[in-house]
Each structure stands twice: as structure tokens, then as C-alpha cells.
Amino acid sequence: MTALEGFKLAPGFLDRGAQEQLVEDLRALLKEAPFYTPVMPRSGKPFSVRMTNCGTLGWVSDRAGYRYQPTHPETGRPWPAIPQALLDAWAELGAYSRPPEACLVNFYASGTRMGLHQDRDEEDLAAPVVSLSLGDEAVFRIGGHSRKDPTRSLRLKSGDALVLGGEARLAFHGVDRIIAGTSTLLPKGGRINLTLRRVTKGE
Ligand code: SIN
Ligand code: FE2
């Protein structure tokens, strides 16, 4: 299967030093906006992945649905600012006219996964989604615009960046599994994925 136009993998985009610095930034951010466990709309079934956000908006899921909101659902406080290193990654990889508004931070413990989905809660679908991976490797799956389209899988390693822009912006994607013991970056193991998104069409 050939990749959709606008799919771009940048292996080793962050070197080890940049990854360690980003983990430091995240430690400070998590004190302000701790990981929480979102639940699925309607059913209330918990996600296996834990989440938080930074930026002026954050993606949340609860019984009422999926949406972007300016505050953490448990603390009620505004999300912390997006670290400069992530803004730089957006500028370099996203090459988009407006800055990102949201950065979803997912924590995958060993044994967790994320089902196949499209990122389509954003108003501005012309902007790419820029993803950075830290820690243990993930088996990432990507397909086409229909859930039934053929998929292919690739490993995302610590420091890798992925851009879903153009046709790939609405590609179905998910994480089948995390391969424990493949990185020494996070002392307790697991994987952190950061996805930068432009949400609104405004300035
Ligand atoms: C996501 O689709 O929100 C996360 C993808 C990933 O963890 O690589
Ligand atoms: Fe996604």
C-alpha cells in the first residue's frame, strides 16, 4: 500500500538530548495538568491511555462526547502553555501559517492501545497534525479515509516525528501495542505521544 499524500515520517527528529529536555518540560507541565483517564462518549468505558493537554485548548472525551475545551476536566484550571521545543517542531514540520492551539499528551503504559480513529474534531482540517513519540516503541497502524481501507503498520520510536497533512490528515490511525523495554528514556517505561493540532480557523 502506498502512503497517502501528506504522510511524512521523520525518524529520529529529536536526538537523545532533545528528548531528555522534553521529558523535563513535561514533568513541570504534568504538575500543573496531571494525566487523567478519559472515558468514551455514551458508554463511559475508560480509555486505556491516560491523557492531558497543553495549549489554549485541549482535547477531552467524556460521556457527553469528544470536544476541545480551555480547561483541564479534573482541576478546572487552564491548560499550561505549549513548550517552546514543541512550537519549534510545529514550525519545522507543520509548515502551517498559524500556530498550534492544542497539544494532546497521551501516556501509554505497557499493555495499552488506541483503536483505529480519525482526528476530526478540529474545525481547521487544512492544518496538519504533528506527532512526536517518546519512550517505548509503538506499533502504529495507518489506513485510508474509510475504516475498511487497507492499513499498514510501522514502528514509532523515541524521537520520531510523524506528520499527517494533506490527504493523510483524515487517515484512520491507531496504536496496536507498545513494545516494553525498547527505550531507556522513561525510567518506568511506557510511551508518551504528543500531537500538536490547530483547532480553530481564527487567528
Ligand atoms: C493519537 O492518534 O492521538 C495518538 C497517536 C499515537 O499515539 O501515535
Ligand atoms: Fe489520532
Image: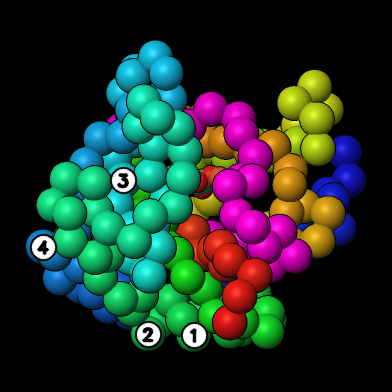
Residue placed under numbered mark 3 in the picture: 51
Measure the alpha-carbon separation of dots 3 and 2. Answer: 20 Å
Quarter-wise, where is residue 77 in the image?
A: bottom left
Tag on residue 31? Answer: 4
Q: Amino acid at mark 3?
A: Met
What span is colored magenta in the figure? 109-136
In the visual, does 126 lie left or right of 43? right
Query: Which element is circle 3 on?
Result: strand
| Image quadrant where residue 179 sits | top left
User: What separation in Å lies between label 3 and label 4 (alpha carbons)?
Assistant: 13 Å
Asked whether residue 117 is drawn in magenta, I would say yes
Badge 4: how crowded within 10 Å, few (<14), some, or many (20+)? Answer: few
Q: Which residue is mark 2?
A: 84
- Mark 4 vs 2, N-terminal side: 4
Q: CA distance from mark 1 to mark 3?
A: 22 Å
Label 3 vs 4, first from the N-terminus: 4
